[in-house]
Image: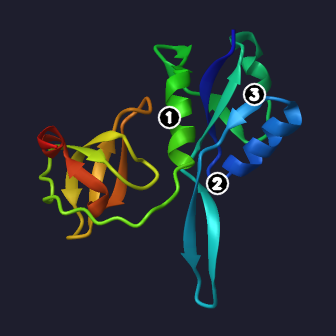
Amino acid sequence: MKNWYAIYVRPRAEKKVAAGMVEAGIEHFLPLRRTLRRWSDRKKWVDLPLIPGYCFVQLNRKNLVSALMVTHVLSVVRFNGEPAIIPNMQIEFLKRMLNQVEIAYKLAGKMPRPGQKVEIVAGPFIGMMAEMVKAKNKTKIYLRLEQIGSAISIEIPADQVIVASELLLK
């Protein structure tokens, strides 16, 4: 039976690992986000990893060694000494989330306070629940996500979240 596993890769080598997985015939998923990069002489749209340092592979546990043989792969993510299996539902959620079309929006919700639960209602993390960590300023906030197997902190525009208690009122 095939399962999804997270593999840890060398810094800034996620796309090279994905290409190596294609060459090796290993089913993989590298979530990318499109962002505008600015240099002193130009601007360019680039695809960056959504979760830097990681790529996901789907294969049998006995074939996991073949993924570890791909250049720039460091190790498989482990939990209690065993390779951590990523639920198929979480991979499908990431794929759906990344296929969302950006739309114009303006929310009139109140700014969450640190510790409050919020739902992300726009952008690449749409539909995920998170915990407000701190406000960077009036337009950017830091959130803690735990749905993808480990807690990560992200910076997100404040108008892309709504306080969870406001969800109950709608």
Picture layout, residue 36 above or below residue 87: below
Q: Residue furthest front?
A: 170
| Nearer to the camera, 157 or 99 | 99
- In three-dimensional space, the C-alpha distance between marks 3 and 1, rounded to whole angstroms, equals 23 Å
Q: Look at label 1 and name its amino acid.
A: Phe
Give the side of residue 29 with respect to residue 25, left or right.
left
Give the side of residue 157 with respect to residue 5, left or right.
left
Q: Which mark is residue 67?
A: 3
| Nearer to the camera, 103 or 21 | 103
Q: Which residue is mark 2?
A: 12
User: Is the C terminus in the top left, top right, bottom left or bottom right quadrant?
Assistant: top left
> What is the crowding at mark 2: few (fewer than 14 residues within 10 Å), some, or many (at least 20)?
some
- In three-dimensional space, the C-alpha distance between marks 1 and 2, rounded to whole angstroms, equals 24 Å
Q: Which residue is mark 1?
A: 93
Q: Look at label 3 and name its amino acid.
A: Ala
Q: Look at label 2 and name its amino acid.
A: Arg
Residue visible at 42% across and 47% down? 125
